[in-house]
Amino acid sequence: MASLGQIIFWSIISVIIILAGAIVLIIGFGISGTHSITVTTFTSTGNIGEDGILSCTFEPDIKLSDIVIQWLKEGVMGLVHEFKDGKDDLSEQNKVFRGRTAVFADQVRVGNASLRLKNVQLTDAGTYKCYIITSKGKGNANLEYKTGAFSIPEINVDYNASSESFRCEAPRWFPQPTVVWTSQVDPRTNFSGVSNTSFELNSENVTMKVVSVLYNVTVNHTYSCMIENSIAKATGDIKVTDSEIKRRSHLELLDSKASLGVSSSFAVSWALLSLSLYLK
């Protein structure tokens, strides 16, 4: 016969195994037994005055009639957008977003819940939630949406200057960026003393035009004009030779991050209750 100590030992092991199994089931199905689906969002950046995309994906479900997509914004009453029964339902949409939102309805079945936001405003910045319900379960994930203005610079020879100069212009930026000139011959050279940068407010009184002039440039050298703020960085390169002018430009958005979320409402107390009933 097993000793009392062995019985207690194996009872403890059984409790641990059952508790671990119960927690796994809870994480997988939640209190109500509903499966938690994976929802993924990405930190997005909207360009003021243009259309933007709030990115969100979820586990695909061919049963379109069972899919519900809800977009919410922290601090805003009502919904940003809702899609259910195979179509948009905007009965609870906040008036701030009226006529400005749309999902990609033909891509919902394959797990695309991304939201198109028309005519992005500075006030659209904030924390959004992409909430999904399907026949497989439900889940949600938050998205940080940033707004600002950014554009690719254009660099030309400044024929108005008294010496060989380059003019770097970009039509729309916000917040106010920094502008730095560099040379590929010596990237460490500081051109602040031979350049002049100005910011001109645009007609909507939010974004600004950036103009920067670099003086005393050398033929056959490649120069770069880099414009950067908290949300984007743009670079324009120029090289003038005896026979041609070569240009190249590049724009990148900063701080893009993915956020993964699932339904997280579960209670260990429920597992302990079930375990105590099992052991009686």
Image (spheres, rainbow, N blue to C red):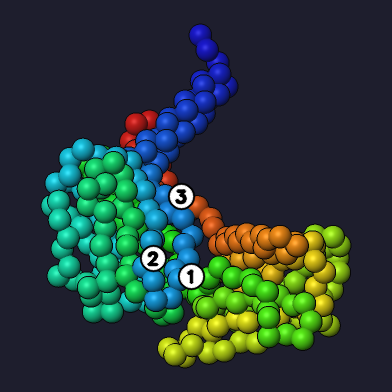
Please name which of the two marks, 2 or 3, marks the residue nearer to the observer: 2
Question: Which comes sooner in the sequence, label 2 or label 3?
Answer: 2
Q: Please tell me in which quadrant of the rendered image residue 143 appears.
A: bottom left
Q: Label 3: which residue?
A: 260
Tag 3 secondary structure: strand
Residue type at mark 1 is Lys
Which one is nearer the viewer's eye here, 275 or 183? 183
Question: Which comes sooner in the sequence, label 2 or label 1?
Answer: 2
Residue type at mark 3 is Leu
Question: Which comes sooner in the sequence, label 3 or label 1?
Answer: 1
Q: Please tell me in which quadrant of the rendered image residue 32 appears.
A: top left
Residue type at mark 2 is Gly
**From mark 2 to mark 3, how far is it between C-alphas?**
21 Å
Q: Please tell me in which quadrant of the rendered image residue 91 appears.
A: bottom left
Q: Label 1: which residue?
A: 146
**From mark 2 to mark 1, how far is it between C-alphas?**
10 Å
Quadrant of the drawing holding the C terminus: top left
> Residue at image x 27%, y 67%?
101
Task: Residue 269 in the image: state x and y as whole percent.
Answer: 40, 47
Which one is nearer the viewer's eye here, 33 or 179? 179
Residue 237 seen in the current view? no
Task: Residue 109 in the image: state x and y as whole percent.
Answer: 24, 43
Task: Residue 156 in the image: state x and y as whole percent.
Answer: 64, 72
**Drawn side of residue 129 relative to residue 148, left or right:** left
Q: Label 2: which residue?
A: 52
Which one is nearer the viewer's eye here, 201 or 275? 201
Task: Residue 190 in the image: state x and y as whole percent.
Answer: 84, 73
